Amino acid sequence: MKKFWFVLFMVSLLFLWGCKEKVVTYTDNGATVQLKAGQTLKVELSGNPSTGNDWRKITYDDQVIMEDGKRDYKLDDDKIGSGGIYQYHFKALGPGKTKLFMEYGPKYDNEKEAVKTFEIEVVVVS
């Protein structure tokens, strides 16, 4: 009986570990990220909305991943004009490959040149 509970415990750990959210930041720019179908990808990028800039023009293949939930923004501190971290959540839908591209620049003027860009390749396996 102890063996049964031990095996059940180990399988549960593997299952929970496999479902763990994968977190990427700007330092992962240009990297390839592998996810399992159903797994969540959390993208954390710095920015400062008080400058008039925002992460805009987000592109990806919605057959492979989709944005999951609303975007979050966390201030670095309580000082006026402080920057913070934008958080985006994506869910891996099914096997495939896509480029996740994001551009940081003037929020209401997509024609102006981006201040910076972020791009990763996302590979989803079953």
Image (cartoon, rainbow, N blue to C red):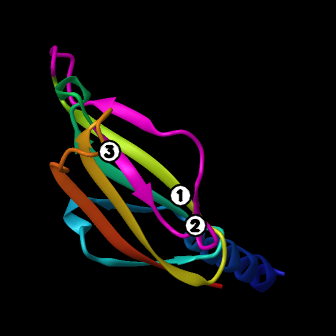
Q: Quadrant of the N terminus?
A: bottom right
Q: How many residues crowd mark 3 within 10 Å: few (<14), some (14–19), many (20+)?
A: many
Magenta-tinted stretch: 54-81
Amino acid carrying mark 2 in the image? Ile
Q: Residue at x 27, y 61 (%)?
A: 118
Q: How many residues crowd mark 2 within 10 Å: few (<14), some (14–19), many (20+)?
A: many
Residue where numbered disc 2 is placed: 65
Q: Is residue 39 above or below residue 98?
A: above
Q: Tag 1 or tag 2, which sits nearer the N-term?
A: 2
Q: Is residue 88 above or below residue 81?
A: below
Tell me: 118 left or right of 59: left
Element assignment for label 2: strand
Between marks 2 and 1, how big is the CA–CA gap? 6 Å
- Determine which quarter of the picture holds residue 52: top left
Foreground mark, 3 or 1, reads 3
The residue lying toward the viewer, choosing from 21 and 118, is: 118
Between marks 3 and 1, how big is the CA–CA gap? 15 Å
Question: Is residue 68 in the magenta section?
Answer: yes
Residue 9: image location, x then y, percent: 69, 73
Amino acid carrying mark 3 in the image? Trp
Residue where numbered disc 3 is placed: 55
Q: Residue at x 21, y 30 (%)?
A: 76
Q: Residue at x 35, y 46 (%)?
A: 56
Please report contact status of discs 3 and 2: CB closer than 8 Å, yes or no. Answer: no
Element assignment for label 1: strand
